[in-house]
Image: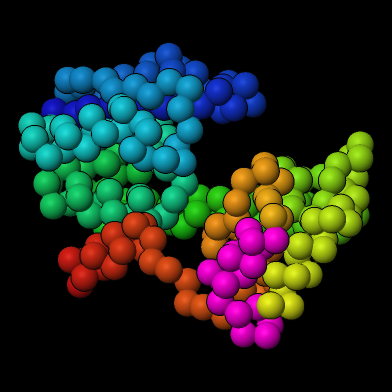
Amino acid sequence: MKAVSYIRVSTEDQAKHGVSLDNQAERIRVYCAYKGLELVAEIRDEGVSGGINKAREGFIRLLDRVEQSDIEAIVLYDVERLSRDMLTLLALERLLNEHDVELHTVDGQIDTSTPNGFMAFAMKAFLGEMERRQIKYRTKKAMEHKKAHGQVVGSVPYGYRREGDALIPDLAEQGVIRTANVMYQAGARLVEIVAHLNEQGITTRDGKPWTPMQVKRIIDGYENKFRKPKTKLSSACRQFIEAIA
């Protein structure tokens, strides 16, 4: 059975866990010899995060090899080398199934050619997704805590200025925010608020005329009054769901 290995390491992974490319490659070679798999190619992504699939050249080449139908198995050190995103993993498994390509992992010895192997793969995908969301949740709460205590987080929002590690209200910008919010609550549209600010000679922090998008950001609760617009990802997910139903 012809197999391709895929190995990836981010700078953070290598620094924290010592999961080097060569270590993964050697473990995969031993696994293939044990399982009787013929390793015909090795694909690498070095120092690349698994967060953005299209930014991983090796990952894209891996998908190309699957669609060429010239391999029968993919071998990884562990599932997280592919992704921690559950949708990515389950979509990839469906793609592999369509092309009769098995997925094997050294860690945990997952083999999707069997029902039990698929269950193990699905559980790893679920646990990886849970960890990814926990990290996102903890980061969000940490940022909220810093903001609540007046610490600067990221860029300085309009209406404030930086003093050391603290945010101090900027009286002039706070006045612009009040004007925009009063007009909005009175029924003014974004374009009307923009026109008023620009006619009064009130510029943005960069000294440029206001735009509707910039005004929207300083209006309290504006986003909650309108339906969230579709994103490319949401549209793609809709198409994917319809395709596999």
Residue stretch rendered in magenta on the structure: 184-200
Residue 125 as seen in the image, left or right of residue 137: left
Quarter of the image where the N terminus is located:
top left
Give the residue drawn at x 56%, y 76%.
189
Residue at 68 percent across and 50 percent down: it is 204
Q: Residue at x 26, y 34 (%)?
A: 60
Magenta stretch encompasses residue 21:
no
Relative to residue 69, is residue 41 drawn left or right? right
Could you tell whether 101 is left or right of 194 in the image? left
Q: Main secondary structure of the magenta part?
A: helix
Q: Is residue 107 left or right of residue 54?
A: right
Residue 43 appears in view: yes
Residue under the image location 27 percent in, 41 percent down: 103
Whether residue 147 appears in this view of the structure is no
Image height check: is 236 above or below 186? above
Q: Judge whether 188 appears above or below 118 on screen.
A: below
27 to 89, vertically: above or below = above
Residue 113 image offset from top left, x and y in percent = 22, 48
Quadrant containing the C terminus in the rendered view: bottom left
- Of residues 12 and 224, the one drawn nearer to the viewer in this rendering: 224
Residue 179, percent from left and from top: 75, 70
